[in-house]
Image: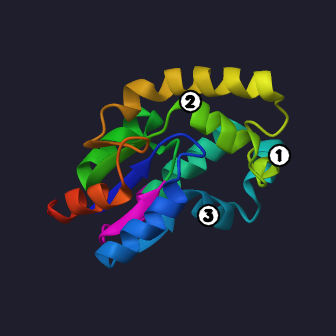
Amino acid sequence: MNIYLTGFMGCGKSSMGKEIAAALNLEVSDTDALVQEKAGMDIPEIFNRQGEAAFRQMESEVLRSIPDQRLVITGGGLPCSEANWNYMKQHGYIVYIEVPVPVLFERLRTDKNKSQRPLIRHLDDNGLKDYILTAIDRRKAFYERADYIFRSSEQDTKILIEKLKTIKL
């Protein structure tokens, strides 16, 4: 079974995924990177040429193409469709990385790679705040069904790693 790390952009999925994978002697599979490889273009270009719906479709296809071989899989929007959620539940353990909105806002506002994030790259500070609040509200029902909610403001990653060591993968 795989470990799925989910959460809003800027929550730390990629960095935590690497840390968890190293601690558990697993590999990391980033669905955004796999979508880019499949499409032969970067995410902003996919959004510009084909739109978010096409990106989400590719994301779903990539999810199903990842083998069940004990991987740490990162993807923020992955669990936000019932079909993807059901697939992830059948094939792994889902962790939601919850980060307080003010922390997400500051991370995304100052992100040096903001231009690579098509959903927020053109937003000013007010627009970014509104987007974060609206998007998290939309996704919350999925995120909160995770097998484990890791509250990054209250817990150290070591706690999550210890929890994952007890899970039969």
Question: Considering the numbered disc 1 on the image, is that residue within a helix, a strand or a loop?
Answer: helix
Neighbourhood count class around disc 1 (C-alpha, 10 Å): few under 14, some 14–19, many 20 upward: few
According to the image, label 1 marks what residue?
Answer: 49
Question: Considering the numbered disc 3 on the image, is that residue within a helix, a strand or a loop?
Answer: helix
Pick whichever, 32 or 160, lies toward us: 160
Tell me the tag on residue 101.
Answer: 2
Residue 118 appears left or right of 2:
right
Q: CA distance from mark 1 to mark 3?
A: 18 Å
Question: Considering the numbered disc 2 on the image, is that residue within a helix, a strand or a loop?
Answer: helix
- For marks 1 and 2, the one nearer the N-term is 1
Tell me the tag on residue 33.
Answer: 3
Q: Is residue 67 magenta?
A: yes
Q: CA distance from mark 1 to mark 2?
A: 30 Å
Q: How was this image coloured?
A: rainbow
**Residue 130 image offset from top left, x and y in percent:** 69, 20
**Residue 155 image offset from top left, x and y in percent:** 35, 47
